[in-house]
Each structure stands twice: as structure tokens, then as C-alpha cells.
Image (cartoon, rainbow, N blue to C red):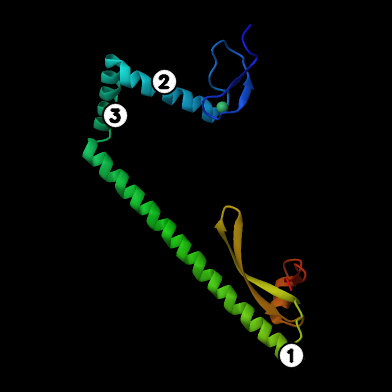
Amino acid sequence: MAKVQFRCAACRRLHRRRVAGQRYCGASACQRERRNAWRRERYATDDAYRLTARESTRAWLEAQGGASRYYRAYRAYREKRSQRQRDEADAAEKQERVIAQEETVGSRANSDANGAEVLETTRRYLVVTARRAKSDAIIVQLRAITDDSPDLQRTTEFSEPCGDVTLGP
Ligand SMILES: [Zn+2]
């Protein structure tokens, strides 16, 4: 009797065998790997398959306006995309520097008001800007304000005050 379990050739994990001679599990990444391996094998050993595959690629490039035109457009697209990523990274870094300056101003004002080196970190802040930095993070620019700030009077006219923000020690 065949063994009940087998080790997937792609992810190397043990799985319950569902088909005789099964070498790959059902995970989509492992199934993609199984199809790629099948194509590589056929391309290397089957002359008719290789000819058909090459002709198919050639016809597809022809439909895109020719190989040189297609690859030129592809390189331009890649260059434009990486330039945009560099610009976004630069803008995010610049925004972070602005926030760092605001924090310095806030703690100095705090120190002046108390007339001593008292570290009071619970204060009221106005969110000046908020923008997405990455898929899991946003950058906000905060400005320290007092309870009688005209900024606070204006914002409470159309929204709930967002409460006090406590920064770390
Ligand atoms: Zn797998």
C-alpha cells in the first residue's frame, strides 16, 4: 500500500496524498511551480513544443508592434515606475523631517512654559496633514496647540475633538 503522506516538491512540507504519484501539494504557489517545471521539461525535451512556444512568443511580440518596440516600451515603463518609487521615498523622508522639527519646537515651548526641565508629554495636537507612506503606515504632521487655540475652536465647529495624544516617555 502506498504511503498516505508525501513531501511537496516545491514547499517541502508533508501533505496527505490525494492522487497516485502526487509530487506537489494544492497550494497555488506550488501548483504554479508544478506547471513551470512541466513547461521547462517540455521545452527542453520536446522539439515540436519548443517550436510552437517560440512561434507563439514571436506572434505575440509582432502583435505588440514588434520585439524592439515592445521591449523599449517595457524598459520605459520600468524606468518610470522606479522613478516614481524614488520620488515617493524622497517625499516621505522630507515629510518625516518636517515632523521632527515640529516635535523639537513643541518640547522647547513646553520647557519654557514650565520654566524648568519638566517632561510633560500629554498635550493637544492638531493634525496638520496626513498621508499614506506605505500600505501599513501613514505619516501625520502634528502641531502642538493649547486649549484656547483658535485652531481648536475652528475644528470643533464641524467635527468632534480627537482628544489628547500621549507621546512616549
Ligand atoms: Zn507545496
Q: Residues within 10 Å of mark 3 (few under 14, many from 20)?
A: few
Report which residue position mark 1 lands on.
113
- Residue 54, image x, y percentages: 27, 24
Q: Mark 1 belongs to which amino acid?
A: Ala
Q: CA distance from mark 1 to mark 3?
A: 71 Å
- Closer to us: 131 or 7: 7
Residue type, numbered disc 2: Trp
Q: CA distance from mark 2 to mark 1?
A: 73 Å
Q: Which residue is mark 3?
A: 60
Q: Kindly check if marks 2 and 3 are in contact, taking CB atoms under 8 A apart as contact.
A: no
Tag in front: 2 or 1: 2
In the image, the residue with mark 1 has its CB under 8 Å from the nearest atom of ligand 1: no
Amino acid type assigned to the residue bearing label 3 in the image: Trp
Q: Residue sitting at 43 percent across and 62 percent down?
A: 87
Mark found first going from the N terminus, 2 or 1: 2
Foreground mark, 2 or 3, reads 2
Question: Quadrant of residue 22 in the image?
Answer: top right
Tell me: residue 10, above or below residue 144: above
Secondary structure of the residue carrying numbered label 2: helix
- Judging by the rendered image, the residue that carries numbered circle 2 is 38
Q: Quadrant of ligand 1?
A: top right
Residue 152, compared with residue 88, is above or below; it is below
Q: Earlier in the sequence, mark 2 or mark 3?
A: 2
Residue 157 spot, x, y in % from top left: 73, 71
Q: Decide: is 99 above or below 44.
A: below
Element marked by disc 1: helix
The residue located at (39%, 52%) in the rendering is 81
Q: Quadrant of the N terminus?
A: top right
Q: Crowding at label 1, few (<14), some or many (≥20) Cα neighbours within 10 Å? A: few
Q: Residue at x 28, y 35 (%)?
A: 64
64 or 135: nearer the viewer: 135
